[in-house]
Structure formats: structure tokens, C-alpha cells
Amino acid sequence: MTLQRLTALRALMASQPTALAAYIIPTADAHNSEYIAPVDARREWISGFTGSAGVALVTAAKALVWTDGRYYTQFQKEVDLNVWTLMKQSLPDTPSMEKWLTTNLVAGSVVGVDPQTMSREEWTPLQTALSKAKMQLLAVDNNLVDAARLELKEPAPERPHNPLMHLPIEYTGKTAGQKIKELREKMVEKKVSALVITALDEVAYTLNLRGSDINYNPVFFSYLLITPTSVVLFWNNGEIPKDIYDILVEEGVELEGKPYGEVTVALKKLAKELSENGDGEHSIWLPSEASEAIHRAASGKGELKKPMTLISEISPVALAKLIKNPVELEGFRQCHIRDGIAVVRFFKWLHDQVDAGKSITEIQAAEKLLEFRKEEMYFMGPSFETIPGAGENGAIIHYSPSREGPQREIRPNDMFLLDSGGQYMDGTTDITRTRHMGEPTVAQKDAFTRVLKGQISVATALYPKGVKGNVLDTLARKALWDAGLDYAHGTGHGVGHFLNVHEGPAGVSWRPYPHDPGLAEGQILSNEPGYYKVGEFGIRHEDLVETIAVTRDSDHPRASNLLGDFDGRGVLGFNTITLVPNQKKCLKLDLLDDFELNYINAYHSRVLKVLGPVLKERELKEDYLWLKKECAPISR
């Protein structure tokens, strides 16, 4: 099928008004979403590779995919390697896509891409690189993969526009009217006439609305246009449901609706109106991550002799929702208690089943965990597809068990990696725990302990307010590096409040997050170092942490050692909000120093203190006894 699909695409490339030497297929929708709906899964359709990140490039003779180390193993399992070439972008000797194009194509070549699927940030450097090599980057408005699908009678599914849900102020802590008032104040500071919001989670956050158009992400396909006098939502057919309209009026917003597909026409019209009114004094504010198509429309390209002035930079909404307000933070803490109950109950159940010799597959395990989460208050669904990696599958970083063919059982000699999360009305969870179902080997204990040492190092770090997250990344890797080990992913990502489980612009990684404004009090991040022995096992420990201000009097394991506050900058640290014990029998105690051992014991004591009474109150006696044993203090 892959070859047939490529043949159809190549025929379309050759038949364009300007024939294309290459066509780029990003893993992207028109909103630069990390997770995409099936209608936008073009790279997956053309290549067969289902990983959530990667860019495909097709020429007359070559078909390549650039992706990172999380997906190398998955790519080789899923893709026809006779047709497709994996470009390992994490490796220093792998050329970038720009470098490959300028090296392998001849001068005069035209490279095509759908401008809706590439942000202005990505478009501009690629265009510059190609221009220097005397090549052209061409915006192809009619997506050629969609056209190939139609030709092969495999059309993409319809774009979903599911019902909207309002999230009340008891969860959001701030009305939509207040959020828009603050955005308009920023518009005055920037001296702009309009603000365009294109990221789906930013639209949802601003309006205190949620949806279900993309699996696991409570968002809806939309754009938001804010002017000094209007708030326009481009959504579905443009009709705003009366209940939503009335609630938003109560929150101080009169929302005007327009059809989703009319956004570029409306932006061109706005650009024309503004250019004719005010001697070129007007400008439009766009996020730099907005698509090239949106940038072109807002500038009036093709409509105006002199393009509209655009302010293209990080979205003010991205910066606003990065810092959680007190209501959101308390919601995060509370939903992690309920989520902890579900995960603890699951692991107790799983050990019981495996110890009793029962056959439990990875998929059955994921389904049972979902059952436990469904019993918890305010649960709305998983925050991503559960990763239940038994044995060798745990080494596939974003593993997804196939429902076709034989199912992998979780065996007594397996290291089992479970990465999962929940969407709750008051917050979002993301937790990984690795447990051996029987007796771990010395090598497994060593790796497990080194990964945990790295996690503790980050969890207990003190650092100046405003440092970038990537500064902390080495702390997570030090114990692994000491043994010549490492992992091929970042250490931490931001998390949305009943929104996307991966949220920018902050994070902790070996490479800087391009728009990270620096760490500040009130952020939620993950802390998730790992180690993966391909073909054998994987280990990852993941907690969510809240950034907190720290003084000598704070409840933080290193607070009493403080001698200063970084010359007035202020001291920050983390408070771990995930509440599930780590497996003690996988620890190699001689690798742990006294501080680390005391930290583990204190953490386990807190888990029992918080979750224990809930289990008792719900008369879950067996679960309580299991947790009590798991949290018993460790001594040398």
C-alpha cells in the first residue's frame, strides 16, 4: 500500500502547474497541534509510521522520515524499509531536512508544502536555506496527500466538530471576560488592532470551554480573533450554542461565531479594512507558531499592495496559561490524590493476577486501569493513550500495543513500564511507574536506581527564579552518565489544566525550548528520566511537579541549607504532586546516599498519609494494606 500511495502522490507532484521536485508532509494540523485528529494524519497515511512526531519528505526517487530517538524502534517495526528511509534526527551526523534538500536537489528545484501544515517559524528558515541554494519553497494550498487519498478512494475522515463544554469558574479560577480584558490590555501595550489565537488549547483556555475533537485533548477545532470591540470564534458552521453563549455573556464575553473554514477570508478582509483606515498605523498580533497560511492571510498577501504589519511572536495566551492560578493549582493537587488511588489499586490488582498465574495482556492491563480511573470523581477520560510496556516493549518509548495479532502477556519475569494519565475537570495527570513482576536482575536494579537518583536530583533541586528549564536537564542524567548510560528524550514538559498533557512553552530537555520564558512559581512540569535497553526492558519514573518559591522556612528537603536568595532573584524548587510509591525491591541501596534514601522514605510516608485515609474511608482494606507494605520505610 505504501508504494501505491507514494506513486499517486508523485504523479500529483509532477502534474502541478510548477512541477515539484520534493513535497514535505509534516505531522501537523493547521493549529500546530502535537496530537492530531485522523483527518490530519497525512504522514501516517503515506508512510505507515504511527509515531506522534516526524516529518516525511518525498521526491521522485526517495521517501524519508525525520524523527527523534523516541521512535527509532517503532519506525523500524511499522514501516516498509525497502521504500522509506529513517533519518535519525537526534544523531549529529544526520543532516537536517534543509541540508538534505539543498545537497540532493539541483538548482531551480521547487519544494512544495501545504502552508496550513507549517508554522511561520518553520517556513522562514527553510525558505531562506532553499533560496540560498537557488531553490524555491512553494505554498501548495490544495494538500496533495488529501488529493492522493481521494484518487485512491481512501478519503480522509470528516473533520470533527463535537459539542462544546463550559468549564465553570470553580475549576478555572478566572472568568473568560477577565482573561480577554487582560489580553486587550496587552494589545494596548503592543499597539495592535487585533490578536489572532490559533492554538486549540489557547482558544479553549481563553473562553473556559472544552471539546473532544482530538483524542485525549479536550479541545475543539477553532480560531479566535480578538479586537478592541469584538471576540469572534471561527468554529464548525459558526453557530454558537445558546447555552454556551449565555454562560459566556455572564462571564463578560459576547461571542460572535463564524464558520471555521472562513478564517483566512475573514483575516484578509480585516487586513484590507485596517489598511484603508489609519495610514498604515495598524498591526495584527499573531503567534509565531501560527501557520504560514494564517500569516499570509493576516498580512493581506494577494489583496494589498503593502502587506499589513504583523507582530509575530510567542502568544500572550501561552504565557498566561503557563502560570496556574491558585484555583488551578489546588485542582492539580486534588486530582493527583484521586489519580493516585486509581493507580495504586491497579498495581495491587496486577500483582495479584500475575502472582496467581493468570494471563493478563498489556491491553487488558490498560483497560483495567481505565476502569479504576472511571470510579474517581471528575474523571473525563485518559490524557493520552496508555503505554503498557511489558519486557522488551518497555524499551519503545511511546509504545502502543496492537490489537491485531497475538497479544503480549505480562509475565512474572517482566519489567513492566506503565505510562498513563487522566483528564479531570480540575486538572490533568501524567505518571509513569516501572515495576518488576518478579525478581529484577542486578543490571535492572542498577538502572532503576540510577534513573530514580536522577528524578530525585531534579525533584529536590533549588535554582534561581527565571532560569530556563534546560539548565536542570543534566541533573536528571548525572547518575546515568556516570555509568555511560543515557535516554533519548527530554526530562520534563509542561502540563495543561484539563488541557493538553504536553504544554509549552516551558520544559526541561537537553535542547532548549525555544520560547521558554524561564521558570516561575505556579508552573506544572513533568519530571521523567528513563533508561531503555532495546529488546529487553525500559525504565521510566515520572511525577508531576509544581514550581514553588523556597525560603529557609519552606517545606523542602534542601530549604534549611539556604545561605542566600541568588542576590534577590528569588529561590525556586519543586513540590512533587504525584502520589504513587516506587517499587522498593528494584532499588540497589548501595547506589543511594543517605539524603536520597531519606527522600524516598519521606515521599512514601506522604503517599501513605494522603492516600491511606481515602482507601480506609472507601473500605478498600486490601488496597490499603498493599499500599502500607509498599510504603514501609527502607533501611540499609
Image: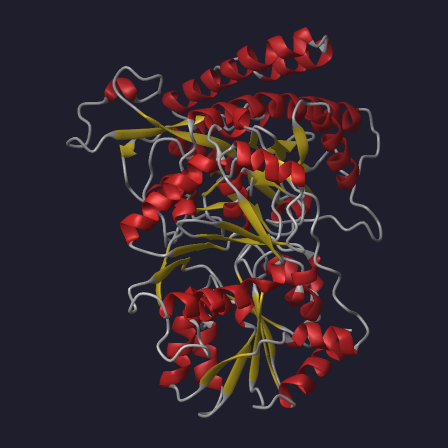
Q: Position of residue 177 (x, y in %)?
A: 46, 37
Specify whether residue 478 is in view.
Answer: no
Q: Position of residue 189 (x, y in %)?
A: 27, 49
Picture quadrant of residue 153: bottom right
Say above or below: 154 vs 101.
Answer: above
Q: Nearer the viewer, residue 480 or 119?
A: 119
Q: Position of residue 524 (x, y in %)?
A: 45, 34
Specify whether residue 606 is in view.
Answer: yes
Q: Nearer the viewer, residue 319 or 468?
A: 319
Image point (62%, 42%), residue name: 218
Image point (53%, 58%), residue name: 32
**Quarter containing the N terminus:** bottom right
Quick one: which residue is furthest to the left in this view? 567
Q: Nearer the viewer, residue 177 or 356?
A: 177
Q: Nearer the viewer, residue 312 or 531?
A: 312
Picture quadrant of residue 481: top left
Q: Position of residue 421 (x, y in %)?
A: 62, 35
Quick one: which residue is furthest to the front in this view? 277
37 to the left or right of 465? right
510 to the left or right of 263? left
350 to the left or right of 98? right
